[in-house]
Amino acid sequence: MSAPPGLMETRAMTDTLRLTRALVDRLPPRTDERGPLMVDAPGPDYYERTAEAVLSRLERPDELWVFAAGSLIWKPRFTVAERRVAHLDGWRRAFCIGDRRFRGCPSAPGLMMSLDRGGSCSGVVLRMAPENLAASLVAMLQTEPPLAPEWVEASTDAGPVRAIAFAIDRSWPLYVPEPLEEDLADILASAVGHVGTMAEYLLNTVTELERHGVRDPQLWRLQSLVAERLERLPVPVEGL
């Protein structure tokens, strides 16, 4: 199948993934240190109201697509009825959500990924199983930042798909402009939270994108830079 413009991104770089599970395992897998949530919890009916607003705009009542740029690719948090490789114009991946709790902590803060305006990126669109659609959507929204999803049109080999996407609002308190690449690599190579590390998050995302035939040039450079930093850490001794 031929890919939409920009879908299959450059393969000019080395085809060898430098970041490995063994390198990720040189970091502590998690920490008990947790920072504050740093944002107020949404109102009690926020998720239900947001889900209702999404469902009211469906062209078909049983067909909801979600554009996955990061962890939703490898941990969708809902039953997937169909998936397609997709390309999105006008939005780009960015490590722009400050994290001192989940994959970061006060002593080793992280930056989670979101979609930010400008540029383009490739990912995967996931069609949610139609059974219990409203409940599934509410459950997924509860795992995402409390920001109403954006409606986007993604290109796929089977034609355009109208989908929701989780994007950043630059006025949101946890928004952080993405650092320069070397500085970002320092953060991703050191951040540890109570659910895991940013290095693991990066490895999972790059690996799953590769499995779908997508290579993001920025993520590919980052995985090499993060691997370079982790190679300097001592190899853990078993049993200690």
Image (tube, rainbow, N blue to C red):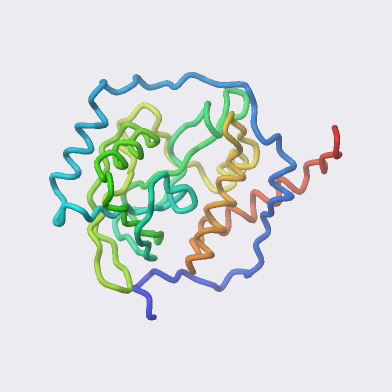
Seen at 61% across and 38% down, the residue is 197
Seen at 82% across and 40% down, the residue is 236
- Judging depth in this view, the residue of 23 and 220 nearest the camera is 23
Q: Position of residue 176 (x, y in %)?
A: 42, 34
Q: Position of residue 167 (x, y in %)?
A: 33, 44
Asked where in the image residue 88 lies, by quadrant, the reply is: bottom left
Indicate whether 67 appears above or below 192: below
- Tell me: 214 left or right of 194: left
Quadrant where the N terminus sits is: bottom left
Quadrant where the C terminus sits is: top right
- Judging depth in this view, the residue of 234 and 136 nearest the camera is 136
Q: Position of residue 135 (x, y in %)?
A: 28, 38
- Tell me: 21 left or right of 149: right
Asked where in the image residue 132 lies, by quadrant, the reply is: top left
Q: Position of residue 134 (x, y in %)?
A: 24, 41
- Judging depth in this view, the residue of 193 and 52 nearest the camera is 52
Seen at 35% across and 33% down, the residue is 142
